[in-house]
Image (cartoon, grey):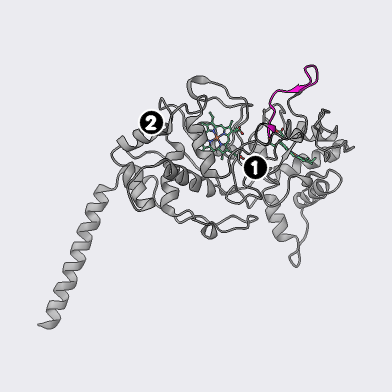
């Protein structure tokens, strides 16, 4: 009798759980099915750091919400432009045009930079001129920029609040359903933090070269020679350093200097710091996956990787504020090619993504 009761009790539990699951199964909307909650990713080989150890770390819930918001054109004034319109996953979250095109076809004055591995930066400088201090602060900029997404934060929030279900995912991520601009920024920034690039041929070489019984392949020999040049004769590592190959500081290479008019097309960091030496200075960009997003520099004026090495080889473009770290390098053609090859060896993986097939409605 007793046994029988227990069995009945268990089967009641099983049946009711199954029914609940069935119900939930039926209710799972397409946008959840195609953007399931995933564990927060681990950094790939070559990238040290732990997303979990960050203050206020990303969670699978903030990242899922951020992924929708990142790709959602409804954040723009006329529903045509998303973050991903200018930062394409296949171009390491940069793009293949010298400058970006925003809302109503308007062109900006700067190239859209890659943001891989930006969960960890040496200094908190975002944008080419470092005017934002965090990914959160950065993310709110383009939404209100009249030539990027052309919206106001209030209108963007109103649009998100008017969808039936977005608030559900704000509740999931933040505990309560309020949709605020700080939460939008935090979710997008957390999605960005998960876009990590590593396990490149360079990282594999770094991992393997000190192993017992290591035999250097032709590929590895080219990487080694390029690395030696990069840190030696060419002194690229004065500025492109650390795991993301950037010091996150500002330097003037003479890009955009107009010799006739004796001025810069874009004054760069000076706009923020008002220091003379920052005239025409821009933030050192990461070199990870750099082969994926020609043309180069803040104005996209340098067409190829080879041309960018040649810019350094000739000592940059002379101007009154040229960085003291830039001087003629006397690299041979073979050395230029080795540096270009070396940069190709920084093509990694781990950041790729595709546009979500459906969004909260
Ligand atoms: C119309 C094209 C466009 C859109 C849309 C756009 N961006 Fe950008 N993004 C740019 C350009 C251009 C820059 C460089 C601007 C500058 O430095 O002044 C930039 C800079 C950035 C940076 C700085 C990277 C670094 O190394 O400092 C991040 C991060 C970024 N955007 C993320 C976003 C996010 C998130 C969104 C959506 C909320 C977004 N962008 C929307 C074009 C765009
Ligand atoms: C003085 C610091 C400094 C040194 C030294 C330096 N770089 Fe740079 N690098 C920068 C800065 C700053 C930029 C962006 C400049 C701009 O847009 O005006 C840049 C841009 C680049 C770009 C374009 C990347 C992109 O996404 O647009 C490449 C490629 C590059 N550097 C490779 C190298 C190589 C190779 C060397 C060594 C030969 C080198 N750099 C030496 C600071 C430096």
Q: In the depicted view, which residue is nearer to us: 321 or 142?
A: 321
- Counting residues from the N terminus, which is met first, the one under dot 2 or under dot 1? 2
Q: What is the x, y in percent for residue 63?
A: 45, 49
How many marks overall? 2
Q: Residue drawn 37% across and 39% down?
A: 359
Secondary structure under tag 1 reads loop
Q: In the depicted view, which residue is nearer to us: 63 or 135?
A: 135
Q: Residue drawn 44% across and 28% down?
A: 151
Secondary structure under tag 2 reads helix
Q: Which residue is mark 1?
A: 289
The residue segment tinted magenta is: 258-270
Instruction: Tell me how far mark 2 sits from mark 1, CA to CA.
Output: 36 Å
Q: Is residue 17 above or below residue 79?
A: below
Q: In this orientation, does residue 297 appear?
A: no
Check residue 155 in the rendering and tell me which mark sits there, or answer none.
2
Is disc 1's CB within 8 Å of ligand 2? no
Image-quarter location of ligand 2 = top right
Left or right: 167, with 152 as reference point: left
| Quarter of image, res 292 | top right
Q: Is residue 48 above or below residue 143?
A: below
Q: What is the x, y in percent for residue 132?
A: 58, 40
Main secondary-structure element of the magenta-colored stretch: loop
Q: What is the x, y in percent for residue 215?
A: 77, 60
Q: Farthest residue toward the left?
A: 1
Left or right: 206, with 324 as reference point: left
Left or right: 191, with 361 as reference point: right
């Amino acid at each position: 009798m007793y046994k029988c009761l227990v069995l009945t009790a268990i089967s009641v539990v099983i049946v009711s759980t199954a029914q609940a699951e069935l119900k939930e199964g039926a209710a799972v909307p397409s946008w959840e099915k195609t953007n399931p909650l995933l564990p927060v990713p681990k950094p790939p080989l070559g990238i040290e750091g732990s997303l979990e150890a960050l203050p206020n770390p990303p969670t699978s819930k903030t990242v899922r919400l951020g992924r929708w918001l990142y790709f959602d054109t409804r954040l723009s004034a006329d529903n045509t432009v998303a973050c991903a319109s200018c930062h394409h996953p296949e171009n390491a979250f940069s793009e293949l045009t010298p400058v970006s095109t925003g809302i109503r076809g308007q062109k900006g004055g700067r190239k859209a930079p890659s943001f891989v591995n930006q969960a960890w930066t040496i200094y908190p400088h975002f944008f080419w001129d470092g005017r934002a201090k965090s990914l959160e602060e950065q993310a709110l900029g383009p939404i209100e920029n009249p030539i990027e997404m052309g919206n106001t934060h209030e209108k963007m929030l109103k649009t998100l609040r008017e969808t039936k279900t977005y608030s559900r995912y704000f509740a999931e991520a933040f505990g309560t359903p309020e949709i605020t601009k700080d939460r939008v920024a935090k979710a997008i920034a957390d999605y960005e933090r998960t876009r990590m690039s590593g396990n490149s041929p360079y990282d594999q070489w770094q991992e393997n070269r000190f192993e017992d019984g290591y035999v250097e392949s032709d590929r590895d020999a080219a990487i080694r020679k390029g690395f030696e040049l990069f840190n030696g004769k060419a002194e690229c590592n004065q500025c492109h350093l650390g795991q993301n190959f950037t010091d996150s500081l500002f330097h003037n290479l003479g890009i955009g200097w107009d010799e006739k008019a004796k001025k810069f097309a874009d004054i760069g960091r000076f706009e923020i710091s008002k220091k003379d030496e920052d005239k025409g200075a821009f933030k050192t960009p990461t070199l990870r996956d750099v082969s994926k997003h020609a043309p180069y520099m803040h104005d996209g004026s340098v067409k190829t990787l080879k041309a960018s090495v040649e810019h350094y080889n000739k000592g940059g473009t002379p101007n009154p504020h040229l960085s003291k770290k830039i001087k003629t390098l006397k690299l041979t053609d073979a050395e230029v090619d080795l540096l270009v090859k070396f940069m190709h060896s920084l093509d990694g993986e781990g950041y790729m993504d595709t546009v979500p097939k459906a969004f909260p409605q």
